[in-house]
Image (tube, rainbow, N blue to C red):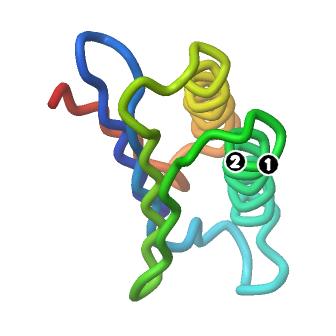
Amino acid sequence: MIEVIFKKSGGVHTALEISGHAGYADEGQDIVCAAVTSALLLTVNGVTEVLMQKATAEVKDGTVRFMLPIGASDAARDFVKSLHLHLCVLSEDYPGTINITVMEV
């Protein structure tokens, strides 16, 4: 199962962490993993390359951590909020493949 943790401060998205494998199909054939990876890359690239925000992305031991900078633009936060919505829809469409947790920090 893919584990996703969204971190919020004052109800606003500030960071996220993603790890695991959906288990929908074999590695390399899993459409849920592909969808999550594509959506995550769109979010990271949208924030860092399109909006030019100084966000931090880290990949370590199969876990991706993405943190918005303090004072991130509303547009950057909206990218992360959109990712959250997208992953919620995927988890509904493919039950048992994605677990989403939201933490207030």
Q: Residue furthest left?
A: 105
Q: Amino acid at mark 2?
A: Thr
- Left or right relative to 76: residue 18: left
Q: Which residue has dot 2 on it?
A: 48
- Left or right relative to 88: residue 7: left
Query: Mark 1 touching mark 2, by CB under 8 A?
Result: yes
Residue 46 in the image: state x and y as whole percent: 78, 41
Q: Is residue 103 above or below residue 24?
A: above
Most foreground residue, 23 or 56:
56
Q: Is residue 1 above or below residue 74?
A: below
Residue at image x 38%, y 32%? 14
How many residues crowd around disc 1 within 10 Å: few (fewer than 14), some, or many (20 or more)? few
Residue 19 in the image: state x and y as whole percent: 45, 68
Give the number of the disc on residue 49.
Answer: 1
Q: Is residue 95 above or below residue 12?
A: below
Q: Is residue 25 above or below residue 83?
A: below
Residue at image x 75%, y 33%? 51
Most foreground residue, 79 or 33:
79
Q: Which element is circle 1 on?
A: helix
Tag count: 2
Q: Amino acid at mark 1?
A: Glu
Gap in angstroms between the C-alphas marked 1 and 2: 4 Å
- Left or right relative to 88: residue 71: left
Q: Quadrant of residue 17?
A: bottom left
Residue 34 in the image: state x and y as whole percent: 79, 64
Residue 48 in the image: state x and y as whole percent: 69, 48
Residue at image x 73%, y 75%? 25
Residue at image x 62%, y 19%? 78
Image quadrant in which the C terminus is located? top left
- Left or right relative to 83: residue 50: right
